[in-house]
Image: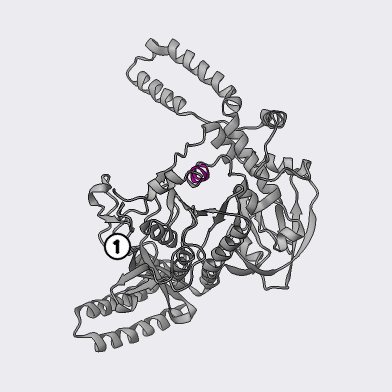
């Protein structure tokens, strides 16, 4: 190991010498050189004196990550062994079987075969347990390693040993790797006779083209109004955000500007192409996990009063990153600028230079700007929807059934017992089928605590400390009895909510990604609000109208 430390030391020393010679007139570069010399010296002494052997790469990576982490969460070091993962993130392409897997209760479980790819074509199902990969037992391996084992060059083969739900015997399945490209638009389709929906989950290469093609196809199918779903979309390539807004906005419109320390990263972006449709009524869905490029698209469309934004306030990331090559095939992803949308606002929420979190009364710190129609909008904390939807939390029993994977497991049983179901938009469990689910739960453990129980426990603890428990013991017993009675009936009290969660999970088993979307058409508050607004032209126009 000593030779690696020596090499590191001499490279660092050489770099320091150049820095001192080149930048001796600059205090900033002198401080950099001084710090590098101190670090190299420290590294050398730790290696020489530390009681155990140290791993130089791990130690250096820890130092690098700690340094970059003090700047912001988006400035990252990408070592050579992670370059392929980063390339997948930006291109959406990799060699593999096209299936998502997770560890559930210690087992490697298929959670989603991608429609039309090798795993789906080979018959791999949600809920299948992967026992071995090419003969290797994988249960004890980390999930990252398992995912890598499932990847491979196109046309190469991998043998999976599978155990299907509730079956003891395993069987082998040979799957040929192929070039997998996870679509930015995993779904588009008709919500009803005249409303089309485009689900956008990423901003990798060709995202703009995918949205354009989806809109053209939906219009050909009769769509006269559009829902653009950006919920859960973490962002990606800025130029694709520009291309997507250009689908709905005229050529020449200003889309976004960047302002950085370097003039290289201070530039303006305009719509360069002919749009597909600048008039079609548009509802844009966002939530707390819509970030970065998603906020550019929703914010720009909001600034031009081009559509009604619906859902929850977005994440609040107004920073731009770029990558630069480093030695040994590594890269640095570094924040180089903030972006500003046409109204002039930057939606960045946290000021990392001052390490200040958002204040409670953020309206006082947020500056006002105006949309094209003169409506007030604010900077500094994401995109605020025109319509904020009410997302009621699941009841404790529903959450428990989901967390303990009982709804997941029963959906697997249902899939194995039924060859087909109605389309995801229409699928509904009968009362008899729901009762079968309740009966199946009779010997399952799904205990949960309600807020009332937690409050009651605190009351009991406090009363005992104050020696007052005997005064309320009878009342406590009656409350506990009533709570127990209520919990026994929760499967029927919250029947509709539990049934919807189960129907959703079952629909995915048959229709995969499209089922994941279409099963929510009749009960998701964001989609229902979008349908209401798009079907009410007066409401739509009123939400986008400026002051009279």
Residue 110 appears in view: no
511 in magenta: no
- Mark 1: which secondary structure? loop
Q: Position of residue 107 (x, y in %)?
A: 66, 50
Identify the residue at horizontal 52%, vertical 62% (top origin): 202
| The one of 293 and 285 positioned closer to us in this rendering | 285
Identify the residue at horizontal 34%, vertical 21% (top origin): 465
Q: Is residue 430 left or right of residue 43?
A: right
Q: Is residue 85 left or right of residue 114?
A: left
Q: Position of residue 123 (x, y in %)?
A: 76, 56
In the image, is residue 121 above or below residue 543? below
Identify the residue at horizontal 45%, vertical 71% (top origin): 239
Residue highlighted by disc 1 = 344
Q: Is residue 180 left or right of residue 384?
A: right
| The one of 497 and 195 positioned closer to us in this rendering | 195
Report the span colored magenta. Answer: 526-532
Q: Residues within 10 Å of mark 1 (few under 14, many from 20)?
A: some
| The one of 468 and 537 positioned closer to us in this rendering | 537
* Model colouring: one colour
Specify the principal SS of the magenta part. Answer: helix
In the image, is residue 235 above or below residue 417? below
Identify the residue at horizontal 25%, vertical 59% (top origin): 354
Q: Position of residue 87 (x, y in %)?
A: 53, 71
| The one of 180 and 294 positioned closer to us in this rendering | 294
Number of marks drawn: 1
């Amino acid at each position: 190991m000593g030779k690696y430390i020596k090499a590191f030391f001499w490279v660092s020393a050489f770099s320091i010498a150049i820095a001192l010679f080149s930048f001796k007139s600059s205090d900033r570069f002198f401080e950099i050189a001084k710090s590098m010399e101190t670090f190299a010296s420290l590294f050398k002494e730790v290696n020489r004196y530390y009681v155990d052997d140290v791993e130089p790469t791990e130690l250096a990576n820890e130092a690098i990550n700690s340094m970059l982490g003090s700047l912001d969460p988006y400035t990252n070091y990408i070592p050579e062994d992670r370059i392929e993962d980063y390339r997948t993130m930006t291109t959406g392409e990799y060699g593999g079987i096209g299936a998502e897997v997770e560890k559930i209760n210690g087992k490697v479980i298929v959670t989603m075969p991608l429609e039309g790819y090798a795993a789906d074509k080979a018959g791999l199902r949600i809920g299948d347990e992967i026992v071995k990969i090419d003969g290797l037992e994988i249960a004890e391996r980390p999930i990252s390693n398992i995912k890598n084992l499932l990847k491979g060059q196109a046309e190469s083969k991998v043998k999976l040993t599978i155990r299907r739900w509730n079956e003891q015997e395993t069987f082998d399945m040979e799957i040929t790797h192929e070039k997998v490209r996870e679509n930015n638009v995993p779904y588009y389709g008709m919500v009803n006779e005249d409303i089309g929906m485009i689900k956008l989950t990423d901003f990798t290469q060709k995202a703009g083209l995918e949205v354009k093609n989806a809109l053209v196809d939906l219009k050909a199918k009769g769509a006269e109004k559009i829902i653009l779903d950006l919920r859960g979309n973490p962002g990606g390539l800025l130029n694709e955000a520009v291309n997507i807004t250009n689908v709905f906005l005229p050529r020449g419109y200003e889309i976004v500007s960047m302002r950085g320390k370097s003039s290289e990263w201070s530039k303006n972006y305009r719509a360069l192409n002919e749009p597909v449709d600048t008039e079609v009524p548009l509802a844009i869905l966002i939530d707390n996990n819509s970030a970065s490029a998603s906020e550019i698209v929703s914010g720009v469309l909001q600034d031009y009063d081009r559509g009604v934004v619906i859902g929850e306030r977005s994440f609040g990331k107004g920073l731009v990153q770029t990558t630069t090559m480093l030695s040994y095939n590594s890269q640095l992803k570094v924040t180089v600028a903030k972006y500003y949308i046409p109204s002039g606002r930057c939606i960045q929420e946290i000021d990392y230079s001052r390490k200040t979190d958002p204040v409670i009364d953020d309206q006082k710190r947020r500056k006002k700007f105006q949309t094209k129609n003169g409506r007030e909008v604010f900077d500094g904390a994401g995109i605020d929807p025109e319509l904020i939807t009410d997302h009621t939390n699941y009841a404790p029993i529903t959450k428990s059934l989901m967390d303990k994977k009982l709804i997941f497991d029963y959906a697997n049983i249902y899939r194995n017992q039924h060859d087909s179901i109605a389309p995801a938009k229409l699928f509904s469990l009968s009362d008899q089928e729901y009762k079968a689910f309740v009966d199946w739960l009779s010997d399952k453990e799904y205990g949960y605590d309600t807020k009332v129980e937690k409050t009651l426990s605190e009351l009991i603890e406090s009363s005992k400390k104050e020696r007052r428990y005997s005064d309320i013991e009878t009342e406590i017993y009656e409350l506990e009895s009533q709570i127990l009675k209520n919990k026994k009936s929760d499967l029927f009290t919250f029947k509709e909510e539990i049934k919807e969660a189960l129907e959703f999970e079952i629909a995915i088993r048959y229709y995969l990604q499209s089922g994941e979307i279409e099963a929510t058409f009749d009960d998701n508050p964001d989609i229902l609000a979008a349908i209401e607004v798009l079907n009410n032209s007066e409401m739509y126009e009123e939400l986008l109208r400026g002051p009279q």
